[in-house]
Amino acid sequence: MKQTKENTEQIAIYSRKSKFTGKGESIENQVELCRQYIRAHYPNCKDESILIYEDEGFSGKNTERPNFKKMMTDARSNTFSAIVCYRLDRISRNIGDFAKLIEELDGLNVSFISIKEQFDTSSPMGRAMMYISSVFSQLERETIAERIRDNMHELAKTGRWLGGRTPTGYKSESVEKITVEGKRKKACKLTLIPEEAEIIKQIYEPMKKSL
């Protein structure tokens, strides 16, 4: 039988941010908002009994995160009875991973609460709405990734170098342009390195003769 909010002694908070920016949904802000929720809904859970699990610099595309794994290990040891997070996508943006997580937590009698969407898996409706939300979360991640890929392809067509290891015979060179609005914009392009280019020609010369 699941523990009730009245006899709960330990609650876990999970927070994640892809990279540190010092703005928006910082790790600290997420944790504080979750603490406020716990104080309001779990009166018998003292602040010192709250367990904090933080992963900064990790994507939500999968669950390969050190403190997320530690949290799940503790959940299997019955260390806490509920996990509270600021928003659903802090846990995962992958439907498959999320479905497995909720199924496992349900088997462990551990509730999952997302305070932003106000979902609580202790109720059937809460579980259903959370699954629906996870679908849109993955859709958002895939749409953003697709938009970035398309944008990079279009930029590459203009001759811009978008980063990474340069091909042998070329180097990346920064160029600056002034837009019609008078703003300075920097970009990179590939510039030929004559001495390296000559080596490449020598390498491919025997191949040309054999064709």
Image (tube, helix red, strand yellow):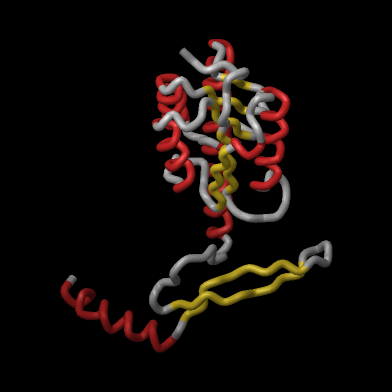
* Horizontal side of residue 61 vs 174, given as left or right: left
- The residue under the point 20% across, 79% down is 206
Compared to 20, does 171 lie above or below?
Answer: below
The residue drawn where x is 57% and y is 77% is 173
Q: Nearer the viewer, residue 16 or 78?
A: 78
Number of numbered discs visible in the structure rendering: 0
Vertical position of residue 173 compared to residue 150: above or below: below
* In the displayed structure image, the side of residue 118 where residue 203 appears, left or right: left
Q: Give the percent coordinates (x, y) of residue 97.
A: 43, 32
Q: Quadrant of residue 123?
A: top right
Q: Is residue 61 above or below residue 105?
A: below
Q: Identify the residue at image location x=45%, y=83%.
A: 193
Query: Is 35 situated above or below 125?
Result: below
Quadrant in the picture for residue 196: bottom left
- Pinpoint residue 54: horizontal percent, then vertical percent: 56, 46
Q: Position of residue 64 (x, y in %)?
A: 42, 44
Could one spot residue 127 in this view of the protein?
Answer: yes
Residue 164 lies, in percent from the top left, at 47, 66
